[in-house]
Amino acid sequence: MIELGKRLLRRCAPLLPAKWRFSAYSKLIRCDAELSDKMVFKLAETREELEACFHLLHDAYVDAGFMTPDPSAMRVTVYHALPTTSTLLCRYGDRVVGTLSLIRESALGFPMQRIFDLGGVRQAGGNVAEVSALAIDRRFRSASGKILLPLMKFMYEYATRQFDTRHLVIAVNPRHVGFYESVLCFRRLAQHTVAHYDFVNGAPAVGAYLDLAAAPAEYQRRYGRMPASKNLFRYFTETTVPNIHFPEKRFYTTTDPVMTPELIEYFFNVRTRVFAGLRMGELLLLHSIYDLPEYKRCLPLVPDDTPRSEMRRRTHRRFPVMCPGEFSAGLPGLRRRYPLKVFECSGSGFRVRSERKLPVGVSGEVSIELGASDRSRMKVTVLRLGSHDECIALIRIDHADLAWRKFVSALSRARTHDELEEATRFI
């Protein structure tokens, strides 16, 4: 009877007024930091883990009518091939029982930007990531709260701590948007419901977003006075869940690529025909992202008549990072220091965000923490400030030290985040 009541509450909650809806959903919340030792939340990294996630997603989407059955029994998209996409999972024993993907905005974009206007979200600044591919094993849906809330916490912490993300965006069925609004404090995009969203087989979709910089204050306002078992503010910002395992990192990178050439070949050429259906723009972007020879062999060939100017325009060798540092320069009468954070780097320079505007045209020294045990000290020059934000600056490296050369070489040649641990072999 209790389980039947919960099911009825889930079905009726979206139909209630906003205030009553929150009250209904809050009855289903249980923040539990002590989970079964069999339950693990982690990044999907191996072929077996990724395949289990894609199988689970396929079955959930077919059940919901969001896709027709695929011969591979997997749902795999071109976005899963990107190094800026991370697939998170929940494993119970040897079985993957929950998954979601975070698709950070890149040159290829992300699915929902094709139909939703995200201009208002981007005006606030910071990286945007789409929450996509959420699925819970049908055999565990009666206990989905024990999976869903820790998975949401993992998503929140991963996005803020390691993925350098300011905004999360979602496109969900109108039946489910109430949960995201009432419980997780998402806000709807100004655009009305999309009647036919091609990415989910033409089902209707509602767009919503969460500003992660403002989320803690919103969670405190909504949950601060609630008991610990329902206090999502404490759960998301203070509680430690030992079952959540973050990727180990040597360097302060903001992506965790896992797709080796072997995995690319297996998932996108052998098991599915995703790469066979690429548009020319997508193909060129993948070639610019995966420019190592072993990856080239996995990608469809670029036609010989493709303009060379198009290939050059799409080539980039910049790497997303999140490295704290300090710029110091001897200006007339004193020596000034500017705390900063490097968010994009290359062999010849990097871009930073700083609390104070950096002096353009001034040369000085920079000290950058590349990781917990790696630090770079170099002579640099501030070239220019951002056209829309003067707290962003482009800095040229006048003399790169060994630590920086090793760092950039590893970023450009390591295929996965695990290989960055062996950075010295790339110098």
Image (tube, grey):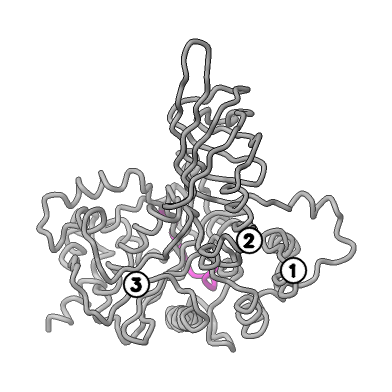
Q: Nearer the viewer, mark 3 or mark 1?
A: 1
Question: For the stretch drawn in magenta, what is the main secondary structure?
Answer: strand
Residue 269, relative to residue 329: is it above or below? below
Which comes sooner in the sequence, label 3 or label 1? 3
- Check disc 3 and report the residue beneath it: 41
- Check disc 1 and report the residue beneath it: 293
Residue 45, relative to residue 29: is it above or below? below
Magenta part of the chain: 199-208
Q: Quadrant of residue 182?
A: bottom left
Element carrying mark 1: helix
Element carrying mark 2: helix
Q: Is residue 156 magenta?
A: no
Q: CA distance from mark 2 to mark 3?
A: 31 Å
- Looking at the rendered structure, which numbered label has been put on residue 426? 2
Q: Is residue 207 magenta?
A: yes
Judge left or right: residue 75 versus residue 400: left
- Mark 2 is on which residue type? Phe
